[in-house]
Amino acid sequence: MDSTARTQQQDDGISFRAAVEEDVPALTALVESAYRGDASREGWTTEADLLEGQRTDPGGVAAVVKDPDSMMLVVERGGATVACCQLEHRGPQAYFGMFAVEPRLQGAGLGRVVLTEAERLARTEWGAGEMHMQVIKQREDLIAWYERRGYTRTGKLSPFPYGDERFGIPQRADLAFELLVKPLS
């Protein structure tokens, strides 16, 4: 996928473009606000009861922006960044991650629009036949949301990186990631 900052405008005033390095601070703040701390509790995607500390950092976001096999998709409405997601080209699959919608806008359909655009880009730009993602298995409400959009639980678990505070400070000892998969063809 061309990493230049292309913009695609939709009828509802939402535009999509690839992130550039200048977007890193705003994207880091958006991801943090959607998952951690009191601000995240305004939306339904909070992980604040499972994890404290940071969700990501500027270095992690910048690494995605700079990686030629990845992109951060920036979603804007009225000039404001309202959502984002990471896409990574992994041969016949694409990986979807670092998905965030501004907490006050969650539950109104924006996430569905972003996910649909991410799937379209992975299929048309990279020829990906599947989208993969990892979700904390304890996030049953979030997993159910993805299942309603065609993702399947695989039962394949990966351990949570306990001891690596770059990913947060776990509030329970049983956290793990589950792989979810959706065919894109």
Image (tube, rainbow, N blue to C red):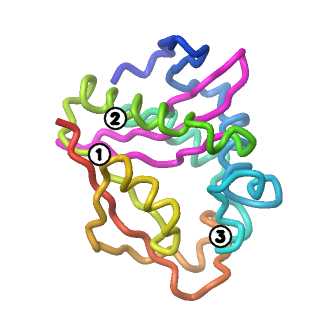
Could you give the CA–CA distance between mark 3 and mark 2, rounded to whole angstroms? 30 Å
Q: Within the image, what quadrant is residue 144 found in?
A: bottom left
Q: Residue at x 19, y 30 (%)?
A: 127
Give the residue number, with chain letter if any, for mark 3: 165
**For the residue labelled by badge 2, is the local secondary structure a helix, a strand or a loop?**
helix
The reply to whether the magenta stretch includes residue 68 is: no
**For the residue labelled by badge 1, is the local secondary structure a helix, a strand or a loop?**
strand
Identify the image quadrant of the N terminus: top left
Q: Indicate the amino acid at tag 3.
A: Glu
1 or 2: tag closer to the N-terminus: 2
3 or 1: tag closer to the N-terminus: 1
Q: Indicate the amino acid at tag 1.
A: Met
Q: Are marks 3 and 1 in contact (CB under 8 Å)?
A: no
Q: Which residues are magenta?
A: 73-101
Give the residue number, with chain letter if any, for mark 1: 131
Let me know if residue 87 appears in the view.
yes
The reply to whether the magenta stretch includes residue 100 is: yes
How far across and down, in percent of the image, does residue 174 sit? 51, 86
Q: Indicate the amino acid at tag 2.
A: Glu
3 or 2: tag closer to the N-terminus: 2
How far across and down, in percent of the image, does residue 50 sit? 64, 74
Give the residue number, with chain letter if any, for mark 2: 119
Q: Is residue 39 above or below residue 105?
A: below
Q: Which mark is residue 142?
A: none
Identify the image quadrant of the C terminus: top left
